[in-house]
Image: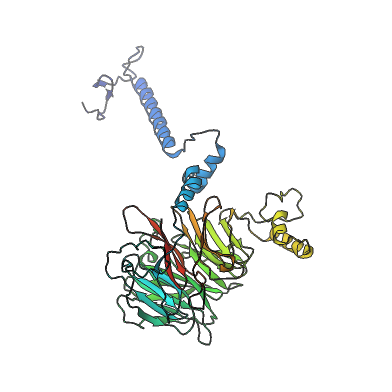
């Protein structure tokens, strides 16, 4: 008996048998279980029970069960960010322990020899370990290792270690190209193996130079000169670790293998490379009130733009729209994505290094509102007293106080930083370690300051104790600072930096 419906019969699930349905005439005056009226009641009860079971299953699948009814703050935070909050161990002890193992003595990777220009900026191919540098102001060069098996540098107390243990030692430089003005930024694009170089411009217009150094001959590349552009300040390539959303996986934009955003004066150029290798460049943002000094990719389709006037905007590559989300109190020099696409680390002039959350900028309110808690605000009276301790700039401090409470955004964290007026000092973030490395003004004595990204506390300071005589052997501003993952099973990390005209790394 399979229970299939048969006209005039009812299948009893308990007895697993068919019973003839008694008509009203035959069942009149008798209480038969399988009469027509009783069968209708049974079928109605079964439908109601099935509907109730389906509704319960649907609610159980869709409803989020609150584990702790009293932890409202934790529940709201987890619901907002989409994942569980990190533990105190991850945010406090783990970054401090990682920074404790950093060796303050640099291991020289690239050294400058007599007659050579210092390294201005550099980048590294993670696959072949080829280093691309800018020597002097406009000479782009590359240096390969002797073999694909990268050996660790030998331990030495001297900064300029020219031993054969260095895989880059005594290997000739190959010039890739020479630009017509000072180079502003250099990026290696690992997705397609391309090299991008931008220049500031002077008597010659600024340019964006694109090439494939592994396939093209030296000095061969595609040069893009944007119109009505006085300077190209920076560029940012979309990281290969970003993945598109399910709705964009099969779109035309997802077929592009490379995306490069370039800050061209007060506009942003977006260069895309198709699978055929052809570049297409166009202006995605035009005519901002101030020059764009730096950019950073926050997600697969979102770019953060920082301007000279302190404004920070977000641009959506899907819709082409832009919006002003944050206001920094000083010109912004560098932007870095923190551990999440909603958290942004902003480095600027006047010793400012802040962590913002773009979801809650907490813009300052009108100072006339008596209900506002001024002491809980970042730009409180104590902040301005630290800027003007002599109390002689009362009028200026009053104006800044009003501007802070009406325009400036509220940061989540403030990091110790020394950068009065240098736009080239670099910063870098390692989300897994929870560390923020920031280059400092060399006049302060500290070259690199490493901070806990979660607490804002300084966990390591690196000093430059080398000899500083002459222009070539003297200290240069650290324009490139990168956390580099080692190719080993341990998952080690090194901190690479421009150092005394060359390149050095700090290991764990």
Q: Position of residue 285 (x, y in %)?
A: 53, 71
Location of the N terminus (image quadrant): top left
Q: Residue furthest bottom?
A: 203
Q: Position of residue 369 (x, y in %)?
A: 75, 52
Q: How many marks?
A: 0
Task: For residue 338, say whether it is visible.
Answer: no
Q: Is residue 406 left or right of residue 235?
A: right
Q: Is residue 409 left or right of residue 92?
A: right
Q: Is residue 480 above or below residue 488?
A: below
Q: Position of residue 459 (x, y in %)?
A: 52, 53
Give the residue drawn at x 35%, y 13%: 31
In which quadrant of the rendered view does residue 192 lie?
A: bottom left
Task: For residue 346, say whether it is visible.
Answer: yes
Q: Position of residue 281 (x, y in %)?
A: 43, 75
In which quadrant of the rendered view does residue 117 lie?
A: bottom left
Give the residue drawn at x 60%, y 62%: 352
Viewer-proximal residue among 247 and 504: 504
Q: Is residue 131 above or below residue 53?
A: below
Scheme by which the image is coloured: rainbow
Q: Residue furthest left?
A: 1
Q: Is residue 11 left or right of residue 306?
A: left
Q: Is residue 87 above or below residue 434?
A: above
Q: Is residue 172 above or below residue 343?
A: below
In which quadrant of the rendered view does residue 388 lie?
A: bottom right
Location of the C terminus (image quadrant): bottom left
């Amino acid at each position: 008996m399979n229970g299939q419906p048969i006209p005039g019969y009812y299948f009893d699930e308990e007895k697993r048998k068919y019973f003839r349905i008694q008509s009203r005439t035959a069942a009149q005056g008798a209480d038969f279980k399988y009469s027509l009226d009783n069968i209708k009641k049974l079928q109605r009860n079964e439908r109601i029970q099935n509907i109730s079971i389906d509704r319960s299953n649907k609610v159980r699948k869709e409803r989020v069960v609150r584990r702790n009814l009293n932890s409202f703050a934790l529940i709201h935070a987890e619901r907002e960010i989409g994942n569980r909050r990190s533990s105190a161990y991850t945010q406090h002890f783990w970054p401090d322990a990682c920074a404790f193992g950093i060796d303050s003595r640099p291991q020289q990777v690239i050294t400058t020899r007599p007659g050579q220009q210092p390294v201005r900026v550099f980048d590294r191919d993670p696959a072949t370990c080829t280093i691309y540098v800018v020597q002097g102001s406009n000479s782009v060069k590359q240096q390969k290792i002797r073999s694909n098996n990268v050996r660790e540098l030998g331990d030495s107390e001297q900064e300029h270690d020219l031993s054969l243990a260095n895989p880059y030692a005594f290997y000739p430089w190959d010039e890739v190209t020479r630009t017509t003005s000072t180079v502003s930024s250099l990026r290696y694009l690992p997705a397609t193996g391309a090299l991008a170089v931008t220049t500031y411009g002077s008597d010659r217009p600024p340019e964006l130079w694109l090439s494939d150094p592994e396939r093209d001959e030296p000095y061969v590349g595609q040069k893009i000169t944007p119109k009505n552009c006085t300077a190209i300040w920076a560029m940012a390539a979309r990281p290969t670790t970003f993945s598109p959303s399910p709705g964009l996986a099969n779109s035309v934009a997802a077929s592009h293998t490379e995306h490069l955003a370039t800050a061209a004066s007060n506009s942003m150029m977006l260069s895309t490379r198709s699978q055929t290798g052809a570049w297409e460049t166009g202006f995605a943002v035009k005519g901002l009130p101030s020059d764009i000094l730096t950019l950073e990719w926050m997600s697969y389709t979102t770019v953060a733009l920082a301007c000279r006037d302190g404004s920070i905007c977000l641009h959506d590559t899907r819709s082409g729209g832009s919006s002003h989300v944050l206001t920094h109190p000083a010109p912004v020099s560098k932007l870095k994505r923190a551990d999440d696409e909603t958290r942004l680390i902003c480095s600027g002039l006047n010793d400012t290094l802040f962590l913002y959350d773009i979801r809650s900028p907490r813009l300052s309110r009108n100072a006339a509102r008596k209900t506002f808690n001024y002491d809980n605000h970042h730009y409180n009276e104590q902040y301005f007293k630290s800027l003007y301790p002599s109390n002689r700039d009362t009028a200026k401090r009053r104006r800044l106080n009003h501007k802070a409470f009406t325009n400036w955004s509220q940061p989540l964290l403030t990091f110790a930083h020394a950068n009065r007026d240098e736009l080239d000092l670099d910063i870098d973030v390692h989300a897994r370690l929870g560390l923020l490395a920031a280059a400092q003004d060399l006049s302060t004595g500290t070259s690199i300051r490493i901070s806990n990204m979660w607490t804002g506390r300084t966990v390591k300071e690196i000093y430059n104790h080398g000899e500083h005589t002459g222009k070539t052997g003297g200290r240069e501003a650290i324009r490139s600072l990168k956390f580099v993952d080692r190719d080993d099973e341990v998952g080690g990390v090194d901190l690479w930096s421009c150092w005394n005209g060359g390149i050095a790394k700090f290991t764990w």
